[in-house]
Image: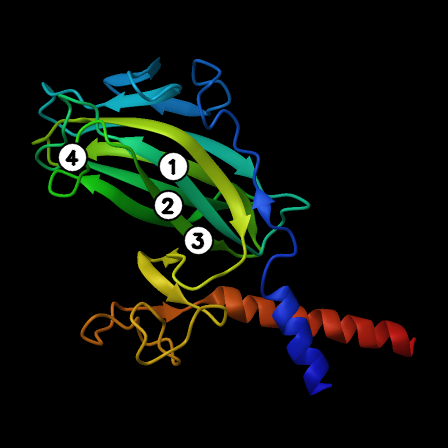
């Protein structure tokens, strides 16, 4: 019984299906924002850039705007069979800061995954700030950014969001985007799961007290260069997988006994 329970837990704690979600026109080769549910900003266009070889989205802030200024885009994806939750979602993009549009002041670029239940309630956001005025790549140099979040059983829809904003009204800048992708992945060590803006420990991640970047065995933190903790917390995803495993095992035993 104990061995069967452990085996069932190992199987069901990770999603059965892994692979791409139905994020459409993530490379913008349609030549516009076809399939994207919303886009906005002082600059919000699909264009081409020299040396890149494909169409890209261009978002930009208004340098003359002295109030809150933002630009962005989003697309909603339904989580239905075969990619039903619970599942680990990974959103990724390629980005560049266009020449002459370096981020200044309080401007920042954020990759976000928003989770919604069947009633349309937004119950969790996972944010990763991938560029700021102080931390941005050289102009026109392409980089990648990603964020990972665990979608619990009640998740009906996931929203892929890219936001360029300046909440203080002191900055400006622009952003080029390409190759946006959304997928269900198998949990791995260091996959930057975000819950309440902290990396999340779970049973699928490397557990160690000494390996830099590993989750501590008691999920009290992530091992850093000086053995410090960044506030890592236990993941409900692993507990959910165990609960599902136990339920599935009980159902099987019940059917066999009938």
Q: For the residues marked 4 and 3, what is the alpha-carbon distance in whole angstroms? A: 24 Å
Q: Which mark is residue 107?
A: 4
Q: Is 237 located above or below residue 169 in the figure?
A: below
For disc 4, the neighbor class at 10 Å (few under 14, some 14 to 19, many from 20) is many
First in sequence, mark 4 or 1: give its number: 1
Asked whether disc 2 touches disc 1, contact meaning CB atoms under 8 Å apart, the reply is yes
First in sequence, mark 3 or 1: give its number: 1
Most foreground residue, 236 or 3: 3
Disc 3: which residue: 149
Q: For the residues marked 2 and 1, what is the alpha-carbon distance in whole angstroms? A: 7 Å
Q: Choose top left, top right, bottom left or bottom right for residue 50.
A: top left
Q: Is 75 located above or below residue 190 in the figure?
A: above
Left or right for 113, reference 41: right
Q: For the residues marked 3 and 1, what is the alpha-carbon distance in whole angstroms? A: 15 Å
Where, quadrant-wise, is the C terminus in this rendering? bottom right
Disc 2: which residue: 146
Disc 1: which residue: 93
- Asked if one can make out residue 72 in the rendered structure from this viewpoint, the answer is no
Nearer mark to the viewer, of 3 and 2: 2
Q: For the residues marked 2 and 4, what is the alpha-carbon distance in whole angstroms? A: 19 Å
User: Measuring 20% from the left and 70% from the top, which residue is drawn there?
Assistant: 225
SS class, disc 4: loop
Nearer mark to the viewer, of 3 and 1: 1
Q: Is 212 located above or below residue 63 in the figure?
A: below
First in sequence, mark 4 or 3: give its number: 4
Q: Is 211 located above or below residue 173 in the figure?
A: below
């Amino acid at each position: 019984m104990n061995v069967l329970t452990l085996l069932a837990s190992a199987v069901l704690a990770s999603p059965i299906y892994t692979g791409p979600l139905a994020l459409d026109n993530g490379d913008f080769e349609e030549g516009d924002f076809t399939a994207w549910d919303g886009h906005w900003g002082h600059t919000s266009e699909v264009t081409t850039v020299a040396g890149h070889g494909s169409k890209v989205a261009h978002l930009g802030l208004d340098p003359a705007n002295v109030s809150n200024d933002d630009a962005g885009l989003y697309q909603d994806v339904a989580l239905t069979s075969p990619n039903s939750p619970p599942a680990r979602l990974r959103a990724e993009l390629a980005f560049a800061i266009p020449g002459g549009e370096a981020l200044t002041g309080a401007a920042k670029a954020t990759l976000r995954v928003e989770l919604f239940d069947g009633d349309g309630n937004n119950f969790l956001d996972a944010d990763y700030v991938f560029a700021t005025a102080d931390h941005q790549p050289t102009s026109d140099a392409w980089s990648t950014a990603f964020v990972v979040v665990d979608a619990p059983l009640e998740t009906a829809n996931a929203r892929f969001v890219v936001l360029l904003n300046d909440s203080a009204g002191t900055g400006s800048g622009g952003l080029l985007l390409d190759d946006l992708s959304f997928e269900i992945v198998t949990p791995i060590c260091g996959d930057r799961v975000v819950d309440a803006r902290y990396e999340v420990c779970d049973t699928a991640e490397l557990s160690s007290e000494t390996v830099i970047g590993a989750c501590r065995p008691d999920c009290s933190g992530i091992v850093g260069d000086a053995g410090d903790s960044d506030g890592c917390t236990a993941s409900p995803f692993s507990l959910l997988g165990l609960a599902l495993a136990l339920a599935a095992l009980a159902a099987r035993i019940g059917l066999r006994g009938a």
